[in-house]
Image (cartoon, helix red, strand yellow):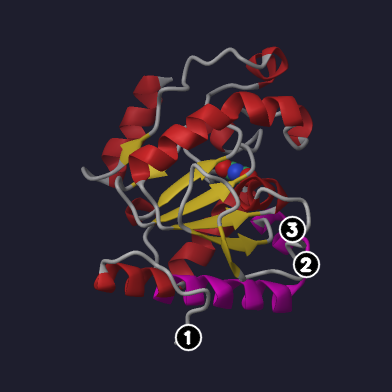
Amino acid sequence: MEQYNRKLIRSFGQHEYMYEPCSECERCLSLVKSRKLVTGGFGKVPCKIMFVGEAPGQAGCNITGIPFTRDRSGRYFQLCLQQARFNFEEVYTTNICKCSPPGNRNPDDKEIENCLPYLKNEIKWVKPEIVVCLGRVASKIFLGTNSFSVIADEGSIQPSGVEWFKGKVIVMPHPAYILRKGKEESKRYMDEFKLIFNMWLAARKIDTKITDERWEF
Ligand code: URA
């Protein structure tokens, strides 16, 4: 497993890092059976922006061990990054749950709870100021509530609802959801990524903590 990851990391360049402490995890017995590779986070460390998905897709990062690679939603997410001028290697991407649930079902509450210590460690390690939540599962964790709608609140910048992350949370629908919608939805979604890119640029330039509720460009 590690060999495969390292090979890919080398091909991406010298300044990227993979979060691997969970690579031998056996906390969720059913996921140990359904997974091929444990998928740690991937990207620059430290990094002011972190993208957080739900769980590895069975045919995607479950095979590569790198988030949002190989399957349709992974490729689409990478396209959104590219169109917005993000470099996959220059941001940090991870998932709430590091193992692929059978049949691509959502991770359940116990699985999320078991995996949360890894995410908290990644937050300490990567030190993001902006976390972009891709889908309801990630948004619920970072907002610390169920009272939101990923559709109605798309692109909104919100305060973190958890004490272990002090930055801003951006709520976004999951790329797999947008893929099921038409071209117009996709265009709007990509435009949101462009706004997020500008916000990230500003955060990097100012090199200071983000404190404003809203950003205007
Ligand atoms: N690939 C990921 O890494 N995460 C998802 O949520 C979906 C696909």
Q: Give the residue type at disc 1.
A: Glu
Label 1 or label 2, whichever lies nearer to me, is 1
Neighbour class for label 3 at 10 Å: few (<14), some, many (≥20)? few
- Cβ atoms at labels 2 and 3 below 8 Å apart: yes
Residue picked out by circle 3: 177
Residue indicated by mark 1: 216
Residue type at mark 2: give it: Lys
Distance, label 1 to label 2, CA atoms, is 28 Å
Quarter of the image that includes the N terminus: top left
**Helix, strand or loop at mark 1:** loop
Magenta stretch holds residue 191? yes
- Is the CB atom of the residue marked by disc 3 within 8 angstroms of ligand 1's nearest atom? no
Indicate the position of residue 198 as horizontal and vertical percent values. 41, 76
- Circles 1 and 2: CB atoms closer than 8 Å: no
Q: Amino acid at mark 3?
A: Tyr
x and y percentages locating residue 148 in the rendered image:
76, 60
Q: Label 1: few (<14), some or many (≥20) within 10 Å?
A: few
Left or right side of 193 for 34? right
Query: SS class of the residue under badge 2?
Result: loop
Q: CA distance from mark 2 to mark 3?
A: 7 Å
Residue 65 in view here: no
The answer to whether residue 161 is seen in the rendering is: yes
> Is residue 32 depicted above or below 217 in this figure?
above
Where is ligand 1, by quadrant?
Answer: top right
- Residue that label 2 marks: 181
User: Range of the magenta residues?
Assistant: 175-198
Horizontal placement of 81 versus 18: left or right?
right
